[in-house]
Image (cartoon, rainbow, N blue to C red):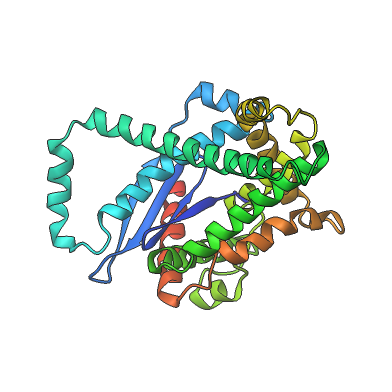
Amino acid sequence: MEKAKFGGQAVVEGVMFQSTSNMVTAIRRTNDEIEYFEMERPQKKWVQTLKKIPILRGNVAIIESSVYGMKHMEYATDRFERDPEDDENIEEEKQSANTAKIVVSTVIVAILSFLVGKFLFTLIPVFVAEMFSGIVTGHFGQVALETFFKLLLLLGYIYAISFTPMIKRLFQYHGAEHKVINTYESDQPLTVDNVQDSSRLHYRCGSSFILFTVLVGFVVYMFVPVDPLYVRVINRILLIPVVLGLSFEVLQLTNKLRDVPVLKWLGLPGLWLQYLTTKHPQDDQVEVAIHSFNQLVRREKA
């Protein structure tokens, strides 16, 4: 019988784990206690239908993850460095606001944040590559240069933000999340020592997905024109869902092939990027990740 697959993400001072039906976040408060935020994952029939369609399912999964992930990140952020005794004020602030507006605004912010980031990440390299069109000519040369600048932008941005204290700790929790998943998938007991001995890299990581969007984009853009500039900009925008969808399929494929000799190398570029997006966690961070995962498992069995 195949083991159940779980995913997750790092949040401020904690980790969120999820299954197809439940989501649980555990965070460590200023009083050193661990608290949970739990929710059932909505199972809308039309969404489940869309998630069965290749390429389209990748876009649906990304939007879904952005919306639900934002709720868990918001929970953790609201309580960051805040005295637990002050939690009543958080609830009062939320109750005083219109609940429907909060939900709608959260969804809109999540989607817009993703789209704005994706647009900038996609279009900035286009304009930079165009500046060198007099030196690097031809279709292949321009697409290759655009891809190079996009990769440079991605790596440079991640490297720069990794030096900020909060992001560094977020990347440590990201490492803890991967270590817990790897320990679980290797059938080892979830103890701090076992988890710390596990790899902080994982084939299904969203970091790998981001890198695949760059590599897949390079291939896709070879089949569309780069001149004139306005046509290039338009097709880059229109092809965003296609690139995202294909990248999702590649991510799923590399995960299936990770134990196949030779073919497992297809997933290595994504794993290499995770050396930037994850860091070795401290034992107390691993404890939070273990608590989150165990709580999810208990919820699944309930």
The answer to which quarter of the image holds residue 14 is bottom left
Q: Position of residue 159 (x, y in %)?
A: 54, 64
Question: In the picture provided, is 150 more to the left or to the right than 72?
Answer: right
Q: Position of residue 199 (x, y in %)?
A: 62, 69
Q: Position of residue 128 (x, y in %)?
A: 63, 45
Residue at the image point whose x is 74% and y is 34% from the top: 221
Q: Residue at the top extreme?
A: 46
Between 287 and 103, the one lying in front of the other is: 103
Q: Position of residue 150 (x, y in %)?
A: 64, 48
Residue 290 at least partly seen:
no
Q: Residue at the front extreme?
A: 134
* Total numbered badges shown on the rendered structure: 0
The answer to which quarter of the image holds residue 252 is top right
Between 122 and 55, the one lying in front of the other is: 122
Residue at the image point whose x is 77% and y is 46% from the top: 135
Residue at the image point whose x is 68% and y is 46% from the top: 214
Between 10 and 223, the one lying in front of the other is: 223
Between 28 and 22, the one lying in front of the other is: 28
Look at the picture and state if 152 lies above or below 234.
below
Question: In the picture provided, is 34 more to the left or to the right than 127?
Answer: left
Look at the picture and state if 151 lies above or below 122.
below
Residue 75 at least partly seen:
yes
Q: Residue at the right extreme?
A: 262
